[in-house]
Image (tube, grey):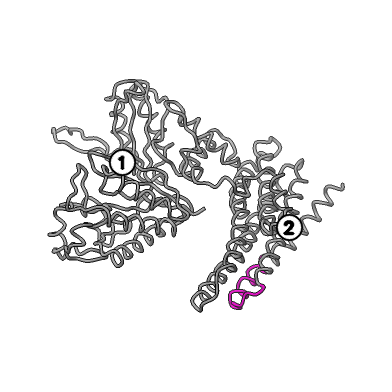
Amino acid sequence: MRIVECVPNFSEGRNKEIINKIAETIKNTSGVSLLDVDEGYDTNRTVYTFVGEPENVLNAAFNAIKVASELIDMSKHKGAHPRIGACDVCPFIPVSQVSMDDCIKLARTLGKMVGDILGIPVYLYEYAATKPERKNLANIRAGEYEGLQEKLKDIEWVPDFGPSIFNERVKRTGAVVIGARDFLIAYNININSKNKNLANSIAKEIREMGKTIKDENGNKVNVPGRLKECKAIGWYVEDYKRAQISINLTNYNVTNMHDAFEAAKEEAEKIGVRITGSEIVGLVPKEAILKAGLFYLEKQGESRAVSEKEIIDIAIYSLGLNEVAPFDPDKKIIENLIEKKDLLSKLSIADFTDELGSSSPAPGGGSVSALAGSIAASLGAMVGNLTYKKKDYKEYWEEAERLAYEAFKIKNNLISLINEDTNAFNNLMSAYRLPDKTEEEKKIKEEAINETTKNAILIPLKVMQYCKEISPILLRLSEIGNKNAISDVAVGILCLLTALKGAYYNVLINFKNFNDETFKKDINERAESILNELIPKLENKLNELEDYLKK
């Protein structure tokens, strides 16, 4: 699932009616989940956190800024927090299957919409910035709302979008800063002491900015810390009756929780302090906690080819995330929080087959093909795991573990396609039900049918492409894998053949009544290329395995 987070800050923290109207606007935008509304009376500011598919998040952000521009009058605003407009700042943050480039495009698209449609000056910041001096939010916000009139006169501060004059509209709305940034993980590490100075000492060693010391001449010099993209201080928490190292990880792809935890353990040991656990404040992307779990599995010499639940459990145990407060993955991991509970992939086998056998046309052969592919990948992971650390296969341990892990990742991708195939069919049916009485309606309906049909074709093609990735894994495991599991390799290949042919049949059925011959030709060539490459290899291997089993 493609997920973007948006965290707009609005200059209103006291008027409940306005705060609630902005919240309702976000909630009422299709495909968006509002996760948090954090009000600040003294700052007169409210921070909203919502997530969803990129296009839906874009719509929600625009709708919220529009409502705020109608309800908040910046000429009357007072508050402790720096601000430049009714919507002061609006960042997009990649969470899952979305790149920073995607978020930059969202920021610039929203900026143009806000500037052109709402008539509000827009500055782009962080990764979306158009000038180096605009990357830093503080630079843009310098002078705040009260200095905006003069800022707009400065040729160096012409907005990226919207008006560059302080008219009556801008006097009311101020400006808005829109951008794209990395996900920030608020992460605290607990120590076995109440002394915040000890925690602060560790913080200075691990944080990027490091610490200041005096050289032999008595001059102050800065010594950088161990970890990039890491900010940290020490403090005492009365509720926990202990000190903590309070950390902000500004890019978990550079420094993740386990990096900070392990570095803190090493530095704590030097001063006679013990790390007892840690906590995540707010929400965390699934990828970040999976990275931590995989790190500890590798450190323990265990196979990484295990379920996401097990990987997450390892991360929780290893980081001590339950020490000061319960860590509930369904409430703390973003993807789990917004995941639909009625997904086909969440059904039991009995419920899935009941749904499959009902009069509903979906799920159907497309979802079953993705399921067959996921079973083939799972069997590959199983055989790899049954080979890893078995004494008769020592020379293949590393390769078997790697193949098992790769198979498990492909399995997860195919599981998601079980849901996507059925969703694609339902979307296509919805397009066919659109009204077509007027010429405009006919045009809209035709475009909708065309786009949803393309998607219905591309999803089974994805299934075939993932099958292509599984094939060499199963073929290699048939050669180096545990011989006691050779029948499992054979069943995996049978499932893979079913997935391949089944997905191809679903590509073909969606070609019917679709007139884009160039698109059809391209897709068919790609699909047949996969079949022609894989089917002979898989069938030959199946015959070979059958002969082996008969001996």
Relative side of 177 to 453, left or right: left
Residue type at mark 2 is Thr
Q: Earlier in the sequence, mark 1 or mark 2?
A: 1
Q: Residue at x 38, y 46 (%)?
A: 49
Can you tell which quarter of the image residue 179 is in? bottom left
Where residue 42 sits in the image (x, y, percent)? 22, 38
Residues shaded magenta: 512-530
Whether residue 344 can be seen here: yes
> Is 525 above or below relative to 173?
below
Can you tell which quarter of the image residue 167 is in? bottom left
Compare residues 489 and 501 and report the one nearer the observer. 501
Whether residue 472 can be seen here: no
Where residue 415 sits in the image (x, y, percent)? 62, 51
Residue type at mark 1 is Glu
Would you name the residue on which mark 1 appears? 39
Binning the other alpha carbons within 10 Å of mark 1 as few (below 14), some (14 to 19) or many (20 upward) gives: many
Relative side of 536 to 6, left or right: right
Q: Is residue 477 magenta?
A: no
Binning the other alpha carbons within 10 Å of mark 2 as few (below 14), some (14 to 19) or many (20 upward) gives: some
Q: Residue at x 53, y 73 (%)?
A: 447
Compare residues 20 and 451 and report the one nearer the observer. 20
Relative side of 43 to 4, left or right: left
The residue positioned farthest toward the right in the image shown: 551
Where residue 503 sits in the image (x, y, percent)? 68, 62
Compare residues 217 and 20 and report the one nearer the observer. 20
Q: Main secondary structure of the magenta part?
A: helix
Residues marked 1 and 2 touching at CB (< 8 Å): no
Q: Is residue 513 magenta?
A: yes
> Is 510 above or below relative to 291?
below
Would you name the residue on which mark 2 appears? 498
The dot on residue 59 is none
